[in-house]
Image (cartoon, rainbow, N blue to C red):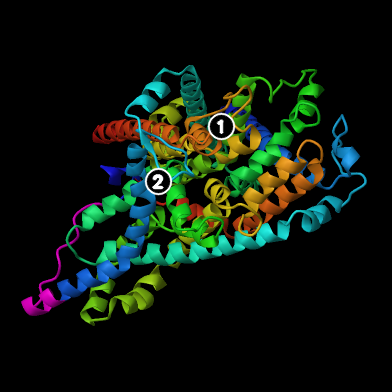
């Protein structure tokens, strides 16, 4: 199942080994195990200790009242869960997460595809523009967040200047929670557009030119050609992006921390990841933070499993 | 003949014009903020706080850069970033290649389970493992040390998967011939497998460099001061103390944080994109 997360995985059985004299084979297998152990163990230990262990530990901690700097955690049963599921602040956080993630996934994929279609054409200067579009993706999210805090500054920023030119006053990006959420979402899409773009562009370049030509000879309209010929060929890339962009945008921390610190008005741009950080390290409620982390992981797991299911069904068709 | 061609030609000219209009729009949306950040970092303080915005720094000054260079331990942050990125890149590339080799070429019981274990970890966001890891690292006394920042980030899943898929695509006959010569695994790796794998290995290395250079949350939690904090954390600190009232040095710091990775990217983008798109395109 999980191997399907990244499409194109070669997961078939290994080719049958060549026949060899039995004694030598046994000796080789023993040595193979030894070497495999030596090659794999350091990495597996690191992943086990720093990825899987905390995941399970989160579940344990989610049933406790715990200050992260204290050695003892008090067991409090389901109190944290009851609090999270019933508090209106958490509902706001969940809503922010859904809006941010949905907008980021749909926005960056639609724009990435549009850009890929545009820059797949033979236009003068397209190579330079391709590099330009991809460039923000390699830059640190924290640096983008810091810079864009000034870009969106309602008094001296770039956005207010451009809006002023068409006679519109800048929204209060740092006071109005809706505009603040809009702002961090746009910033995130701006930064990550390059990723969806290169994946779609690679898919476009790998598509079968003969099908396109056949459609052209049939004098199909551009839209029909896209819908009937191009889009079906982009399906694997689309599924791949749906999963990876969703996973990535669900986890955004740096841009939110540097632009708004989860505000304004308390939790205007607080997503679940930011809530985990804030409860654990700012409010000193690590048990509650672990609860949010556990809920978040379960949501992520369910969403991904559903996506993989849909993807498998789509491929069977 | 010409009568038939004319409308098609006109529509293709129209579509070209549309294409260039799109191109121009893209350039504006992506490049304008970058350009504006750059020129603002080169302005004198009163000019930054001037409405309407000036599109060229006049007078042009590098004061903001020298303020950053001298003032707030920026060279320390830069050094820390280099140490953290270099260590993590070396560790991850070595571990990733070794793991991938074992998963692709060695036969041992439970191999597919190990693969599932590696890939499954891709689904666990770093951001939710920080709670327990923070407690563990604090217990070990590793807070505010490079060890504390580096070790918990050192496990490698994506790179292992990328390299394994590449190794499996290598011609079987060559690998088997080398096995028949009873070449040891390290020798095999170094003499036979890696020489056929440079492009993928370079892609893996570049993606690792970019990821680790841009790490933010974990180093933010680990570092208390400029002795170990990397650039993104230092930059956020600078923004905390100077933002709003003195954007010049903050923006200069932003440019300095972005620049090294942008230069690496511009020089080697083809390789990096190859790694990102591997596996995404074919279903």
Would you place residue A150 above or below residue A131 in this image? above
Residues under labels 1 and 2: Cα distance? 44 Å
Q: Residue B45: in sight, yes or no? A: yes
Nearest to N terminus: mark 1 or mark 2 = 1
Query: For numbered disc 2, what is the local secondary structure?
Result: loop
- Determine whether, in the image, residue A7 is placed left or right of residue A102: left
- Determine whether, in the image, residue A297 is placed left or right of residue A127: left
The crowd level at tag 2 (other Cα within 10 Å; few <14, some 14-19, many 20+) is many
Quarter of the image for residue A41 reads bottom left
Q: Tell which of B249 and A308 is nearer to you.
A: B249
Where does label 1 land, which residue? B1
Mark 1 vs mark 2, foreground winner is: 2
What x and y, as percent, mark residue B139? 44, 54
The secondary structure making up most of the magenta span is loop
Quarter of the image for residue A287 reads top left
Residue at (41% x, 22% y) in the render: A83
Q: Please provide the residue range marked out in magenta.
A: A10-27
Count of numbered circles in the view: 2
What x and y, as percent, mark residue B233? 63, 49
Q: Quadrant of the C terminus of chain B?
A: top left
The crowd level at tag 1 (other Cα within 10 Å; few <14, some 14-19, many 20+) is few
């Amino acid at each position: 199942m999980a191997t399907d997360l990244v499409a194109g995985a070669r997961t078939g059985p290994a080719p049958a080994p060549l026949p060899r004299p039995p004694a030598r084979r046994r000796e080789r297998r023993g040595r193979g195990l030894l070497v495999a152990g030596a090659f794999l163990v350091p990495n597996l230990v690191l992943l086990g200790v720093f990825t899987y262990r905390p995941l399970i530990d989160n579940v344990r901690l989610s049933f406790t009242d715990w200050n992260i700097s204290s050695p003892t955690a008090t067991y409090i049963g389901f109190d944290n869960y009851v609090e999270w599921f019933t508090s209106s602040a958490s509902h706001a956080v969940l809503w922010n997460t859904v809006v941010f993630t949905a907008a980021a996934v749909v926005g960056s994929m639609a724009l990435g595809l549009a850009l890929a279609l545009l820059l797949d054409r033979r236009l003068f200067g397209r190579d330079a523009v391709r590099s330009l579009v991809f460039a923000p993706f390699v830059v640190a999210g924290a640096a983008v967040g810091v810079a864009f805090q000034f870009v969106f500054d309602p008094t001296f920023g770039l956005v207010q200047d451009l809006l002023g030119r068409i006679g519109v006053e800048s929204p209060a990006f740092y006071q109005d929670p809706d505009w603040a959420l809009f702002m961090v979402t746009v910033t995130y899409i701006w930064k990550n557009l390059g990723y969806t773009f290169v994946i779609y562009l690679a898919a476009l370049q790998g598509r079968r030119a003969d099908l396109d030509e056949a459609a052209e000879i049939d004098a199909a309209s551009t839209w029909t050609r896209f819908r009937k010929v191009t889009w079906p060929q982009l399906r694997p890339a689309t599924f791949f992006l749906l999963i990876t962009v969703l996973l990535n945008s669900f986890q955004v921390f740096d841009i939110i921390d540097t632009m708004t610190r989860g505000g304004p008005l308390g939790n205007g741009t607080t997503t679940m990841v930011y809530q985990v950080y804030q409860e654990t390290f700012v409010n000193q409620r690590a048990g509650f933070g672990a609860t949010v982390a556990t809920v978040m992981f379960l949501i992520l797991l369910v969403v991904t499993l559903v996506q993989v299911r849909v993807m498998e069904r789509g491929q069977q068709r | 003949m010409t009568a038939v061609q004319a409308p098609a030609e006109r529509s293709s000219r129209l579509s070209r014009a549309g294409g260039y209009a799109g191109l121009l729009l893209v350039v504006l949306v992506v490049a304008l903020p970058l350009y504006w950040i750059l020129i603002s970092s080169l302005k004198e303080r009163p000019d930054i706080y001037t409405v309407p915005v000036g599109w060229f720094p006049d007078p042009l000054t590098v004061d903001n850069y020298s303020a950053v260079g001298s003032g707030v331990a920026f060279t320390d942050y830069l050094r820390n970033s280099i140490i953290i990125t270099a260590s993590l890149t070396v560790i991850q590339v070595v571990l990733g290649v070794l793991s991938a080799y074992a998963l692709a070429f060695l036969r041992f019981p439970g191999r597919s389970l190990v693969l599932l274990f590696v890939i499954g970890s891709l689904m666990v966001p770093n951001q939710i493992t920080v709670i327990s890891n923070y407690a563990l690292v604090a217990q070990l006394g590793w807070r505010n040390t490079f060890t504390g920042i580096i070790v918990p980030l050192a496990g490698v899943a994506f790179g292992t998967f990328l390299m394994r898929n590449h190794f499996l695509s290598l011609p079987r006959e060559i690998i088997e011939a080398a096995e028949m010569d009873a070449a040891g695994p390290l020798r095999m790796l170094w003499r036979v497998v890696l020489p056929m794998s440079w492009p993928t290995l370079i892609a893996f290395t570049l993606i690792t460099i970019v990821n680790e250079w841009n790490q933010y949350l974990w180093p933010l939690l680990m570092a208390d001061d400029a002795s170990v904090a990397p650039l993104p954390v230092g930059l956020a600190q600078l923004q905390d103390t100077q933002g709003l009232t003195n954007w010049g040095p903050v923006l200069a710091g932003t440019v300095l944080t972005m620049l090294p990775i942008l230069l690496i990217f511009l020089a080697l983008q083809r390789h990096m994109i190859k790694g990102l798109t591997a596996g995404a395109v074919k279903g």
